[in-house]
Amino acid sequence: MKTAARPRTTGTTPLRSAAFRRFVLANLISATGTAMAPLALAYAVIGEGGGAGSLGLVLATNTVPTVAFLLAGGVLADRMSRSRILVAGNVVAAAAQGALAVVVLSGVASTLSIAACGFLSGVAMAFTVPAGQGVVNQLVAAEHLQQANALVRLPSNAVRVLGPVVGGLVVALCGPGWALAWDALTFLIAALLLHGLRLEKPVTVHSALSDLRAGWAGFRSRTWLWTYTVAGMIVVAAWLAGFQMLGPLLAAELYSGAGSWGLVQGAFRSACWRARSSACGGSRTGCSSSP
């Protein structure tokens, strides 16, 4: 598979490109809602009387479809315009989070309704993540790629640290429904911004089945890769159970609830960011996002 040629950006910074600025802004705005959403989702479940079982079900219905459809999302991102995928995915996520905000604000939310909205959001994420990862390559020239990735990641990482703190305050003062409504609005704004990108469709030379077979063969042949993947699945599952499920419940029972849990999340993400910065030799441009 080969992709369309990268544009030759002028000047010394990718920010001179209007398309790149549009993508960065959409990514940053969406990140503000995404950083608040897990906390708001947890306290929406707790607010309707749910415990560990209900919260675990909601987390599972949000996470499992993302994992299940991620491969399909990657295949689609190699065969369709990534900007169209991103717009569609953000619209679906906006609809799901908007519906969730409505049922929470109206006081009729249940574990089933929250889980259903979470399922749709998880499916949308499975298609937008692979598409989003290939956008920068199409927007900037090769010599500006490292700088462009830094410009995308650094503001988003900062938002991921501050977002839970702000989200905790919003949930504590106004309720989880308003934080979820903001998340829905950010998805909608991002969709409108991304609609103007008009990225070319990648040019494929093999069928989807052929690419899947080649990819699977390459994955199985690298022991370090599949063992790392399996270990990562176990670690992430344990982390979700402890941090995302038990954490909000304990904060609601033993501390001041959403406000306290927002501060804990912000501190944790800040520590992760600093640790990854140190691991990258003091340069944050090569570090991945906070959890």
Image (cartoon, rainbow, N blue to C red):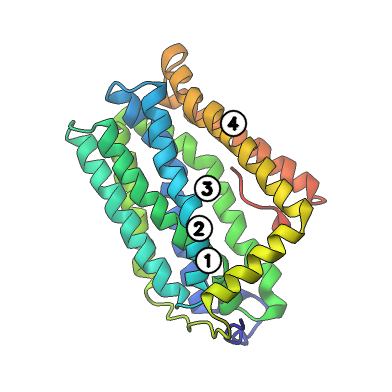
Q: Is residue 142 above or below residue 177?
A: below
Q: Amino acid at mark 3?
A: Val
Structural crowding at the residue carrying mark 3, measured as other residues with C-alpha within 10 Å and reported as few (<14), some (14–19) or many (≥20)? many
In the image, taking residue 198 as reference, residue 243 lies left or right, namely right
Q: Which mark is residue 238?
A: 4
The residue under the point 69% across, 60% down is 219
User: Dot 2: what SS?
Assistant: helix
Label 2, residues with CA under 10 Å away: few <14, some 14-19, many ≥20: many
Pointer 2 and pointer 4: residues touching (CB < 8 Å)?
no
Q: Which residue is found at the position 65% from the left and 71% from the top?
A: 214
Q: Is residue 226 above or below residue 207?
A: above
Q: In the image, what residue type sits under mark 1? A: Gly
Q: Earlier in the sequence, mark 4 or mark 1?
A: 1
Task: From the image, tell me which residue sits under label 3.
Answer: 159
Residues 268 and 99: in front is 99
In depth, the one of 10 and 71 nearer the eye is 71
Mark 1 highlights which residue? 74
Check whether the beta carbons of the residues at disc 2 and disc 1 lie within 8 A of each other: yes
The amino acid on which the numbered mark 4 sits, given as a three-letter code, is Ala
| Location of residue 274 by image quarter | top right
Q: Between marks 3 and 4, how big is the CA–CA gap?
A: 25 Å
